[in-house]
Structures are given as C-alpha cells and as structure tokens.
Image (cartoon, rainbow, N blue to C red):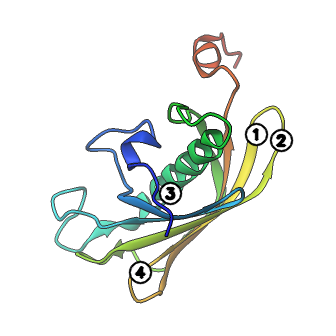
Amino acid sequence: MTEFPAIEHLIPHRAPMVFLDRVSEFTTTRLVAHYLPPLEHWCGERGLPSFMGIEIIAQAIAAHNSLHSRQTNANAAPSLGVLLGTRRYEATQPFFPLAEEITVVIEEKMQDASGFGAFEGVLFSARQVKLASATVKVFRPADFSAYMTSPRTP
C-alpha cells in the first residue's frame, strides 16, 4: 500500500473548509480519496447537504494536481487553481448520510498546456451507493498569484 502525504500538504484549504481526510489511490489520471463528515461540520440533523459534493470533488482534483506535481518535485506546494464550474452536477439525494464515509473518485478527461482541464467526479457511500456525480472544469494557471491579481474585463 502506498502512503500519501497528509491532506493539508496536498490542498490549500484549511479548517473548516477541508472536505477530504485521506487519499487511498493515485495515478496520473485518477485519484480516490475519502471523507467522513464530522457531525458538527456543515451537517444538520439530516446529514451533509448534497450541494457540498461539488466541493469534495474539487478538493480531490486539487489533491490529484498536487500529487501529479510531486512526481517531478517532491517538495511542491499544494496546487492552486480555479474551479470554473460544471454543466452537470447530479445528486441522488438532498443530504449525504451522517457518520458514513464518502469515497470520491475523480478521473482526468483532459488537461491542456495552458492549465485548463476537465474531470469526472463520482461520490459513493460506504455501501458503494452512488451519491453524486459531476463533470468539473478547472483552470490551473502557471502563475496563480499573477492570474489572481491581473485585471479582468467584463
């Protein structure tokens, strides 16, 4: 079994905005990660709202990008990028179950040299029931700081 770095070394997010606990599988085009929502973390009495699934997928993509960067630079900082959106996010229920681990599987469908990419993401319950899925578009600029401070035109 491969040991992966702790999540805080793979994504730029910090509590309370961390929606991954660990990575269990990584290839150049795929990542599997897990998240057990703590009862006090965005959960109500009915569970974690399913709209949070898009953020779980996005953080898995960030972890994938960081692990990919670490293949050429073992000390690479967490990848910074932008979630551009999705045309399709489908959840099978309005809330994800309480006290049940969520598995997220993401697969890279395309990534171009400028940093634009598309990923398929699927969330599963501990019983392997599909909870949600999305095709997510992302952008990882070569110089994130310059990108964020550059002027935008409407």
> Circle 4 is placed at which residue position?
125
Residue at mark 4 to residue at mark 2: CA–CA distance? 32 Å
> Circle 1 is placed at which residue position?
116
Residue at mark 1 to residue at mark 3: CA–CA distance? 18 Å
- Residue contact between numbered discs 1 and 3, judged by CB atoms under 8 Å: no
Residue drawn at 25 percent across, 56 percent down: 42
- Residue contact between numbered discs 3 and 4, judged by CB atoms under 8 Å: no
| Mark 3 Cα shell of 10 Å, populated few (<14), some (14-19), many (≥20) | many
Q: Is residue 91 visible?
A: no
Callout 1, which amino acid?
Phe
Callout 4, which amino acid?
Ser
Give the camera-side residue of 36 and 136.
36
Give the camera-side residue of 35 and 132.
35
Q: Earlier in the sequence, mark 4 or mark 2?
A: 2
> Circle 2 is placed at which residue position?
112
> Circle 3 is placed at which residue position?
54
Q: Earlier in the sequence, mark 3 or mark 4?
A: 3
